[in-house]
Image (cartoon, rainbow, N blue to C red):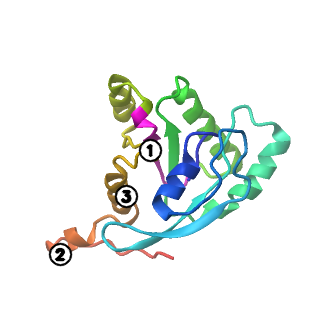
C-alpha cells in the first residue's frame, strides 16, 4: 500500500492479513515496510506491503530516504494507493503522493486508488470522489466493501478471475511471484 500519512494503510493491512502492525494517529508510525501473503477471491495468493506514509513538500534530503524505503515497490504488479475520502484535502493528498512517486521514479508502476474511511464521509462527497478517481469506497475499520475491492485488485493484476476462465473466456498469461 502507498498513500499519504494517516489514511488507514496499516488498518487496511491488518484487516486483510489479521496482523497486528501498529496503528497510530501520528506521523511516521509505520517506519519499516511489512509484507504478508493474502488470498484473493479467486484463490490466487499475492503479497501486500504496508509502507511508510507520504507527506507533502517532502524535503529533498528525505526523498532519498523514501526512495530506499520504496525500493520494495519496484517489482510490484500493482500499487494500491489508499486515500482518506473523509479528508477535505484528499485531492491535494493524492496529488502529493503522485508527486513523490514521480520524484522517486515509481510513477510508471500500475496503480489503483482506494478511497478509505467511507464510513466517515458524506455520501455525496463519497460518490463524487469515487467517480472522479474511478475508485472503490471502503472502510478498513468496518471492513465495508473489502471483498469487492479484492475482486477489483484481482482483475487489475490477473486480468480475468478463475470464474471468468471457467466460462470459457481466454485467460491472460501473466508471470507472478
Tell me: 130 left or right of 87. Answer: left
What residue is at 37 percent from the left and 30 percent from the top? 126
What residue is at 68 percent from the left and 56 percent from the top? 70
Q: Please tell me how many numbered marks the rendered image carries.
A: 3
**Residue underneath mark 2:** 166
Tell me: 17 left or right of 119. Answer: right
What residue is at 70 percent from the left and 39 percent from the top? 26
Residue 33 in the image, given as x and y percentages of width and height: 67, 60
User: Does the segment drawn in magenta span residue 73?
Assistant: no
**Label 3, label 1: how many angstroms apart (C-alpha)?**
11 Å
**Residue underneath mark 1:** 114
**Label 1, label 2: how many angstroms apart (C-alpha)?**
28 Å
Residue 112 in the image, given as x and y percentages of width and height: 45, 49
Q: Does dot 2 land on a helix, a strand or a loop? A: helix
**Residue underneath mark 3:** 150
Query: Quick one: 168 or 23, which is closer to the camera?
Result: 23
Query: Is residue 79 at all visible to an observer of this figure?
Result: no
Residue 29 in the image, given as x and y percentages of width and height: 71, 47
> What is the crowding at mark 2: few (fewer than 14 residues within 10 Å), some, or many (at least 20)?
few
Amino acid at each position: 500500500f502507498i498513500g499519504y500519512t494517516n489514511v488507514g494503510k496499516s488498518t487496511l493491512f491488518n484487516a486483510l492479513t489479521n496482523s497486528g502492525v501498529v496503528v497510530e494517529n501520528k506521523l511516521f508510525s509505520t517506519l519499516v515496510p511489512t509484507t504478508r501473503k493474502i488470498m484473493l477471491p479467486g484463490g490466487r495468493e499475492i503479497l501486500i506491503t504496508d509502507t511508510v506514509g507520504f507527506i507533502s513538500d517532502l524535503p529533498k534530503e528525505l526523498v532519498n530516504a523514501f526512495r530506499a524505503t520504496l525500493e520494495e515497490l519496484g517489482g510490484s504488479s500493482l500499487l494500491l494507493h489508499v486515500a482518506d475520502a473523509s479528508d477535505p484535502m484528499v485531492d491535494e493528498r493524492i496529488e502529493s503522493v503522485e508527486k513523490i512517486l514521480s520524484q522517486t521514479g515509481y510513477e510508471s508502476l500500475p496503480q489503483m486508488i482506494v478511497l478509505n474511511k467511507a464510513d466517515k464521509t458524506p455520501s455525496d462527497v463519497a460518490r463524487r470522489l469515487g467517480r472522479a478517481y474511478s475508485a472503490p469506497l471502503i472502510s478498513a475499520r468496518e471492513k465495508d466493501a473489502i471483498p469487492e475491492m479484492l475482486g477489483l485488485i484481482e482483475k487489475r493484476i490477473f486480468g480475468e478471475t478463475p470464474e471468468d476462465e471457467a466460462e470459457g473466456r481466454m485467460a491472460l498469461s501473466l508471470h507472478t511471484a
